[in-house]
Image (tube, rainbow, N blue to C red):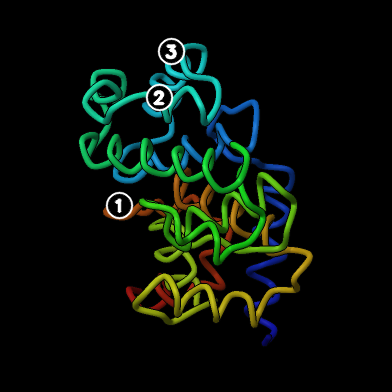
Amino acid sequence: MDARQSAVLAELENLYHGTESALEFASVFQLLIAVMLSAQTNDNQVNRITRELFPRFPDAAAFAALTPEELEPHISSCGLYRNKAKNIVATCRILCESYGGEVPQDKAQLVALPGVGGKTANVVLSVGFGIPALAVDTHVQRVSNRLGLAAGKTPEQVEAQLCALIPQDKWAEAHHWLIWHGRRVCAARRPNCTACTLAAHCPGKNKED
């Protein structure tokens, strides 16, 4: 890690220390479902859905008893809801059949579930179980590339580079720092560089000047 990268990470920690997931959940299982719903849907919309969804279907067994078509109306206000309904029901049936209705704490077992990719698995591991992992979503990939913390074209490349750069005990926290900076300041189309306290250290900003 060079001095510039160290300064970037220190400022991110200063700005966003203590931030957490914006998703609302009461169990690791509910976290898993919320993250599955969040693809191409913002967290506020997911929370609106789950506030009604989880009281009706609080655990894996309740979802497993549904058909995808029965679940669809409850999640139809999020993107790709038909595919999500299919994956959620299939995942919950596997959880009931193979894991006693519980969410496994192993990444290989998580990504083997329908609709669960590396990002979702890492969120569940780090946020749900406190296991070191660094989830890379669109915010994390965009912001880390702009700030010169990574230079990857895929989430997997960015994850590997960030994990090599950032101490393991900071992985989960750094995930939130990068997400919140992407939401509050470093937007995809119109980043607010004039208000960004990282501008002096940002290769992306300095390249444009």
172 lies left or right of 31: right
Q: Secondary structure at mark 3?
A: helix
Q: Nearer the viewer, residue 94 or 112?
A: 94
- Within 10 Å of disc 1 (Cα), the crowding (few <14, some 14-19, many 20+) is few
**Residue ranking furthest to the front:** 97
Q: Secondary structure at mark 1?
A: loop
Q: Give the residue at x 55% y 66%.
A: 108
Q: Nearer the viewer, residue 67 or 154?
A: 67
Residue under label 1: 190
Q: Is residue 123 above or below residue 53?
A: below
Name the front one of labels 3 and 1: 3
Q: Give the residue at x 43% y 12%.
A: 52
Badge 1 amino acid: Arg
Residue under label 2: 65
Name the front one of labels 2 and 1: 2
Q: Which corner quadrant of the image does residue 36 belong to? A: top left
Give whichever of discs 3 and 1 has the lower sequence position. 3
Q: Quadrant of the N terminus?
A: bottom right
- Within 10 Å of disc 2 (Cα), the crowding (few <14, some 14-19, many 20+) is few
Badge 3 amino acid: Glu
Residue 13 screen position, x and y as percent: 71, 56
Residue 66 screen position, x and y as percent: 34, 24
Give whichever of discs 2 and 3 has the lower sequence position. 3
Residue under label 3: 52
70 lies left or right of 187: left
Q: Secondary structure at mark 2?
A: loop
Q: Any mark on residue 206, and which?
A: none
Given contact means CB atoms under 8 Å apart, are the residues at marks 2 and 3 in contact? no
- Within 10 Å of disc 3 (Cα), the crowding (few <14, some 14-19, many 20+) is few
Badge 2 amino acid: Ala
Q: Quadrant of the C terminus?
A: bottom left
